[in-house]
Amino acid sequence: PLSIVAAASGGMPVVSYWADSALLADNVQYPNFARTIPASDMEAYSTVSVIKELGWNNFAFIYSVARSEWFRALSEAAARVGIRLVTAQKYELGASDEETFRSIEQAVAAVANSGARIILEAVDYNEFPHLVRAAEAHNLTGRGYQWVSPNRQQATTVLARGDSLG
């Protein structure tokens, strides 16, 4: 966000719990900026490295519009480690939960049509239950499918509430 950039470049110390932009990693330009989460490019590289280490050669990606920078970083990291991103599907936040669900459902349908069996998700906390329902409706859960969530706390919390995923 612009407020972080302005404060950090103006000499005010800033510690962010959410800013993951790789641009903010420049310690010369932003010497007073620190974060508690990794930069998006580091997180994406780590994620695709794990996918490759597990022997998976291709995967699909479903993400919210808020994670567009992470998608860019993920695409670059996948190419760098030599695995194939079969399809990437972005969903939009609607004016209502129902509109958001329809957008997620369309993204999940496209993933189902891609034939991908390894699916990485980067959805927002409130949309995760919609993703679970859409994945089940398209039979993308259970034996033969693997879902990867870089946000373990989110997935654990939602599934503990009783939502299912396979």
Image (tube, helix red, strand yellow):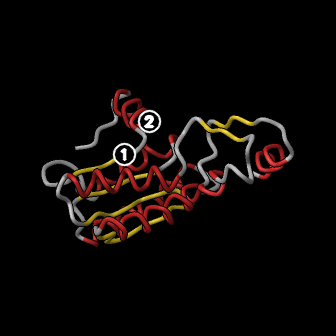
| Residue beneath disc 1 | 149
Instruction: List x then y, in percent, for residue 54.
Output: 19, 52
The one nearer the camera, 162 or 20, is 20
Count residues near mark 1 (Cα–Cα under 10 Å), then give few for <14, some for 14-19, many for 20+: some
Whole-percent x and y of residue 143?
13, 50
Q: Amino acid at mark 2?
A: Gln
Q: Position of residue 77 (x, y in %)?
A: 40, 63
Q: Position of residue 112 (x, y in %)?
A: 28, 66
Q: Residue at x 25, y 66 (%)?
A: 58
- Asked which secondary structure carries label 2, the reply is helix
Which one is in front, 101 or 8?
A: 8
* Image-quadrant location for residue 61: bottom left
Please rate how many residues cluster around mark 2, counting C-alpha atoms within 10 Å: few if below 14, some from 14 to 19, many from 20.
Answer: some
| First-in-chain label (2 vs 1) | 1
Instruction: From the viewer's side, name the closer residue of 149 and 128.
Output: 149
Q: Is residue 155 above or below residue 105?
A: above
**Which label is found at residue 154?**
2
The residue furthest top is 160
